[in-house]
Amino acid sequence: MSRAGWIRVSVVVAAVAAVELLCQGGIITRFTMIPPSEMVVALAGILTSGRLTPAIVRTLRIVGIALAASILVGFVLGALLHALPRVRRTVDPLFATYYAIPIYAFYPLFIVLFGLGDVPIIIIGFLLAVVAMIVSTLNGFDRIPRALLKTARIYRMGRVRTALQVMMPCAAPYIFTGVKLAIAYSFIGVIGAEFIMSGSGMGYEIAFAYNNFDNKVMYPLIMLVLVLVTIINMFLHFWEMILFERRRRG
């Protein structure tokens, strides 16, 4: 692990230790938060008992669908916009202001159109994640050196070969960044939507525990989300750094 990595880990460990001490010393009351050590124990009990397994599986399934759709659609739209500069100039201002739009404000409309099932939640997760993927794809294609594209034309490489052998390897690190952002936004969208428009799922269980002052359920579930997203993003970050290094050397 690099020096920067050790510093990040040390900061996280120090922050968790500080919260633990504040909780154990009574400075942070148990009514407000339970110690991190108890969160871990409570999370282990939740996972082993299986009581909330259906809710966890449901949320992860919905996140997976929203994430896969946002990555696929975002990449395709990003590639198309890169190939159509005039269209891109038209929609670029929309991307700059997109996240100022309160997506959750449209959930009553989604309920009217699609009912109270999983579809409205998937749509919210998708809408939050897809633009991050589009922008990252555009960023990746914009950073392809023109010399490589000219070399591909000199060697009479077709569009498919140029895309697969030149454009994709160069843009891959930035596309990975889009995937990382899409993961975070998908979790935010889905769990946030479950707070307000679902009768099951991790978001619903967190909201239910919050309304009933059940810190031994609320905080462990929040911890589970943080751990899942952190592990996935660390894995993607590892490969992202490898791709950036290959791109730099190439």
Image (cartoon, helix red, strand yellow):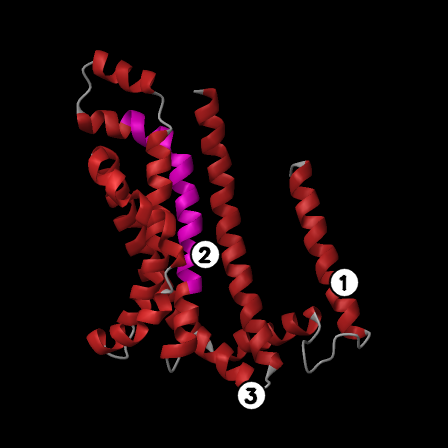
Q: Residue furthest bottom?
A: 212
The amino acid beneath tag 1 is Ala
| Dot 1: element | helix
Where residue 5 appears, x then y in whole percent?
65, 42
Specify the quadrant of the image occupied by residue 59. Answer: bottom left
Disc 3 marks which residue?
A: 212
Would residue 2 be found to the left or right of residue 234 on screen?
right
Disc 1 marks which residue?
A: 18
Where residue 148 appears, x then y in whole percent?
32, 18
Residue, x 50% and y 43% (percent of image)? 237
Q: Residues within 10 Å of mark 2 (few under 14, many from 20)?
A: many
Magenta span of residues = 165-188
Cβ–Cβ under 8 Å for marks 2 and 1: no
Q: Residues within 10 Å of mark 1 (few under 14, many from 20)?
A: few
Question: On residue 184, which mark appears?
Answer: 2
Magenta highlight on residue 171: yes
